[in-house]
Amino acid sequence: MVAGLLERLGVAAAAYTQGDNPVHTPIDGSRIASVKLLGKADTIARIDQAQAAFEAWRSVPAPRRGELVRLFGEVLREHKADLGELVSIEAGKITQEGLGEVQEMIDICDFAVGLSRQLYGLTIASERPGHHMRETWHPLGVVGVISAFNFPVAVWAWNTALALVAGNAVVWKPSEKTPLTALACQALFEKALKAFGDAPAGLSQLVIGGREAGEALVDDPRVPLVSATGSTRMGREVGPRVAARFGRSILELGGNNAMILAPSADLDLAVRGILFSAVGTAGQRCTTLRRLIVHRSIKDEVVARVKAAYAKVRIGDPRKDNLVGPLIDKLSFDAMQGALAKARDEGGQVFGGERQLAEQYPNAYYVSPAIAEMPAQSEVVRHETFAPILYVLAYDDFEEALRLNNEVPQGLSSCIFTTDIREAERFQSASGSDCGIANVNIGTSGAEIGGAFGGEKETGGGRESGSDAWKGYMRRQTNTVNYSRELPLAQGIVFD
Ligand code: UN1
């Protein structure tokens, strides 16, 4: 299934045939490759090489560093269809979403190229005569990237494109569930390196490994920044360990994203927004819509329309003309069924959620998306289950809707559908949504790369991708220069 693709993407057969760790496609559960898992010593060796590369790369002018990222963007354009298909095979995304993910990579490369000429610092008025002050942004060092199965390539690219123009080296540990897309990215990056010519060897490294490799990256004092995407449980381990050695982390953890659906909303728009956000990627985006907080006066109508839309969703092979592909594995299916059972126990009325196509694919896990009408924001609703379950809650007044939006431990994405400008503005105000993303008349998922991406509370507080997220990948230096013939002290201190 993958040999031809991997060959076109430049991955040597030995890299995916000679290990003893099997790789399965969620499409039918079959084994498509086997890879070797690296342990602690190999990870440390890669950090050594990355550190050496960093020491050369940090002195290359930033616009020249941008040229490497520009070339990488070109290589990605050339290979978009193949890499997108590999994402479909390995992560189970439908073709459109596999391609969309590669497009995010291309977009962040373009963004980073522009940025490579705009790593601006401030100049600051000095309080002393004959002095000036400025801020300089310097490269940080080796950036560790830990990524999840559901965005197996884009999240690495968000981090790597910024890290490279910032003058850093990168060591990447992808999810153990998606090593093939990682091998492909590495091969494509090497193609860009070749076209570039004289980049230091080992600038961007791949470590396919498990816990041991991850721990080596997290604990190494030569890795000043660890950017980790995954569950809140993972973040609870990574964050404190990196902090204990005074490293920085960018944590992109669980979401529990809500839509407030107000009585004035354009319901045609809202139903389409719900469908993509709740069902897209089979509910396996960190930005997936998980809670619909709908005004009681329109609740029955909305639920009926969403159910009708769900009934028409085509489920099946993500490379064919379907809208919903498989869940990543059996564990994920079991977690979904467990959550639906709990929802029933907590008084919920569940529609959908059954396994599909089990006869055709006994080793793959397709499900119909589920809707659970809940009497309250009970425990199961407050928990992120990485599957297509949409909990529906009714509200009577806007303050209650806002409170429900915010009353969960996670704080990634949120949205409101309304045509009432007061509600829309209030939702995005200081006393509105407490999430990192708050949209109006757009669903919770599918953010553009130009904005800073991330969230609050148990989502971890990190920001990646656009806006000034690049500052997280650099160190800030404050410079004061005295060009006078005196040595005045700050704060007016006389020290003679
Ligand atoms: C993720 O699920 O980890 O906003 C990232 C979105 C995508 C990124 C999701 N651009 O849905």
Image (spheres, rainbow, N blue to C red):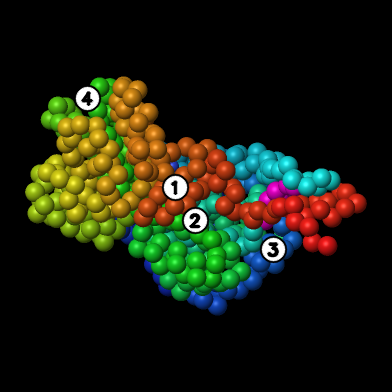
- Label 4, secondary structure: give it: loop
Tag 3: residue type? Answer: Ala
Mark 2 vs 1, N-terminal side: 2
Q: What is the number of the mark on residue 53?
A: 3
Crowding near pointer 1: few (<14 within 10 Å), some, many (20+)? many
Secondary structure mostly seen in the magenta stretch: strand
Mark 1 vs 3, N-terminal side: 3
Q: Quadrant of the C terminus?
A: bottom right
281 left or right of 73?
Answer: left
Tag 1: residue type? Answer: Gly
Q: Looking at the image, do the residues carrying marks 2 and 4 touch, with CB atoms under 8 Å apart?
A: no
Label 1, ligand 1: CB separation under 8 Å: no
Q: Quadrant of ligand 1?
A: top left
Residue drawn at x 78%, y 47% is 128
Residue 266 is inside the magenta segment: no
How far apart are the two marked residues, 4 and 1, measured between alpha carbons? 29 Å
Q: Nearer the viewer, residue 39 or 114?
A: 114
How far apart are the two marked residues, 1 and 3, measured between alpha carbons? 29 Å
22 left or right of 67?
Answer: left
Which residue does the numbered mark 4 point to in the structure image?
A: 263
Q: Quadrant of the N terminus?
A: bottom left
Q: Looking at the image, do the residues carrying marks 2 and 1 touch, with CB atoms under 8 Å apart?
A: yes
**Residue 49 appears in the figure:** yes
Which residue does the numbered mark 2 point to in the structure image?
A: 250
Q: Nearer the viewer, residue 334 or 218?
A: 218
- Label 2, secondary structure: give it: strand
Q: Which residues are magenta?
A: 133-139
Mark closer to the observer (2, 3): 2
Label 3, ligand 1: CB separation under 8 Å: no
